[in-house]
Image (tube, rainbow, N blue to C red):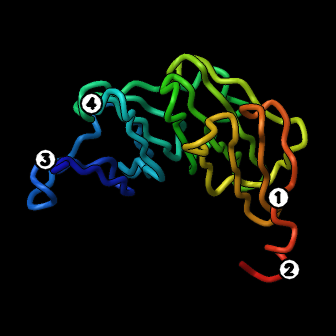
Amino acid sequence: PNTLYAGTNRGVYRSDNGAVTWVEASEGIARDAFGNSYVYTLVLDPSQPSTVYAGTLQGIFKSQDKGQTWKGKNTGLRVGIMPSVEALAIDPVDTSVLYAGAGYQGLSGNVFKTEDGGESWVPLTVGLSQGLVTAISVDGGDHQRVYVATRGQGLFTSRDGGRTWQTAGSNTLETGI
């Protein structure tokens, strides 16, 4: 309970003492020409707390040693260019299943799913817009139900683990919520 992670524009930082002190934990996460690595989102494997996934400006990275070392996990995500990953969610029942929201040059986005802990990703597109994904959530009571929020394209839900999608909350865009 004292271990915390923070994703920043300079990588991942970890505290093992409840945020009293922090250490950089970014070895292996790609950096841009200015030394930045822009970590947008982090998810921890609840069944193996030393396993952490990072969504970054340059794809997805996985650590199995509390952030000491990271490896790129982008097989299947690349569509001409490396995507920016701003949203990640892990299935609370089967933690080898994750969902990622990948964006391409700020113009379009896709939702991807892995069933092997990030080794390979497949796109989930049936009924889903190509809006940039800002958030993903897996229902804790029904892990086949997945929710996706997009920038400007609305909210979507899947009842079959992402195979098909439907719009959700049609009034949310009208009310500004």
Of callouts 2 and 3, the N-terminal one: 3
Q: Measure the C-alpha gap from mark 4 to mark 1.
A: 35 Å
Of callouts 3 and 4, the N-terminal one: 3
**Left/right of residue 87 with respect to residue 170 in the rendered view:** left
Q: Measure the C-alpha gap from mark 2 to mark 4.
A: 42 Å
Q: Residue 16 carries which label?
A: 3
Q: Residue furthest front?
A: 141
Placement of 98 over or under 54, stated as above or below: above
Q: Name the residue under label 4.
A: 50
Q: Residue furthest right?
A: 127
Of callouts 1 and 2, the N-terminal one: 1
- Which residue type carries mark 3? Asp
**Left/right of residue 160 with respect to residue 93 in the rendered view:** right
Placement of 32 over or under 82, stated as above or below: below
- Which residue type carries mark 4? Ser
Q: Are marks 4 and 1 in contact (CB under 8 Å)?
A: no
Q: Residue 1 carries which label?
A: none
